[in-house]
Image: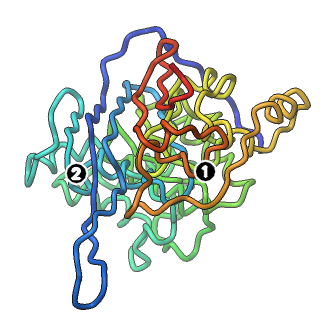
Amino acid sequence: MWIEPRPEMDPTRPEPALIEASSVSKHYPVRGGPLFRRHTLSLRAVDDVTLDIAPGETLGLVGESGCGKSTLGRLLIRLIEPTAGAIRFDGHDITSLTGAALRERRRSMQIIFQDPYGALNPRMSVEDIIIEPLQIHGLARSGARQQVTRMLDLVGLPERVRDRYPHEFSGGQRQRIGIARALVLHPKFVVCDEPVSALDVSVQAQIVNLLADLQRELGLTYLFIAHDLGVVKHISTRVAVMYLGKIVETAEKRALYAAPLHPYTKALIAAVPAMHPADRGRRRALRERLAGDVPSALHPPSGCRFHTRCPHAMAVCREQEPRVVEPTPGHRVACHLVG
């Protein structure tokens, strides 16, 4: 898959964060145990995550299915309530906002879902789907139809489709409609929750290029969630790697792909198909073998959560959780092998 590269941001230039998450967690209570000895367990979907996203950048969030990526994305825009921690958006603490105050902030935070068909109401026309966010926020005035026309043009769809219904479109076209709906309120921050994983490979590149073009044109900030590091490499400014509810490594994308530090990151990068012979050799050199399955978030391993699958696990890995270190500016990793 070929994807048009996007301009690089200067990682040394200080940027005030648009989104800041400090020690954010989301734990779900789950009833377990024998019938007459039931007790409540805690499913640690997201556990003590700290990250920030600067205006205009794309933070790629990668990891295996079930690691908590989508939950974290929904936490950042307050679609779900955090169990602990704090979230700041555009300089304002939104952790405990409710009612009208939260609705006002949500105009600047939107989400593009993974399933372009399930995210659209099959009983609504394209025009109604795009106008609905304006109606929710009391902004659907006389110029709403013109806004629909503009949004369709932005995402590369002709105006004549406004009266059609979701079942009449291909997957890629439905995702374009979902993007138009997400952007009609002119948000600053958009969570892209695996927006291309349900699409054909040939269509994935088109949607990723569209998102990159819209970011440049509208000044958007993205959290781009995916499990495909090949896609993330082309659209992201920085990359955060998540495993079993925790961020294990964060770095500017070139640094991460050239010199990953965490064994889990090395394994993910090594699994990406390489087109160039030099890339194949480099990936063979850092190839890591993952043993076993991802542990349950109901019973996460003690110490480093990755130690049950890590080929370099030591005694300290089973006993102590690794602290986050920064061996080079902007490159953070939580691993006993580093620092």
Above or below, 164 against 9 in this view is below
Question: What amino acid is found at the position of numbered circle 2 in the picture?
Answer: Pro
Q: Within 10 angstroms of label 2, few (less than 14), some, or many (20 or more) residues?
A: many
Question: What amino acid is found at the position of numbered circle 1 in the picture?
Answer: Arg
Counting from the top left corner in percent of width and height, residue 25 is at 28, 48
Above or below, 251 against 11 in this view is below
Counting from the top left corner in percent of width and height, residue 269 is at 69, 38
Q: Identify the residue shown where x is 66% and y is 47%.
A: 206
Q: Identify the residue shown where x is 36% and y is 49%.
A: 72
Q: Is residue 275 left or right of residue 83?
A: right
Viewer-nearest residue: 25 or 166: 25
Question: Which numbered disc covers residue 104?
Answer: none
Q: Is residue 239 left or right of residue 191?
A: right
Above or below, 28 against 329 in this view is below
Q: Identify the residue shown where x is 27% and y is 37%.
A: 23
Which residue is labeled 1 in the image? 309
Counting from the top left corner in percent of width and height, residue 169 is at 59, 69
> Is residue 146 at all visible to an observer of this figure?
no
Which residue is labeled 2 in the image? 82
Which secondary structure, mark 2? Answer: loop
Q: Are marks 2 and 1 in contact (CB under 8 Å)?
A: no
Which secondary structure, mark 1? Answer: loop
Q: Within 10 angstroms of label 1, few (less than 14), some, or many (20 or more) residues?
A: some
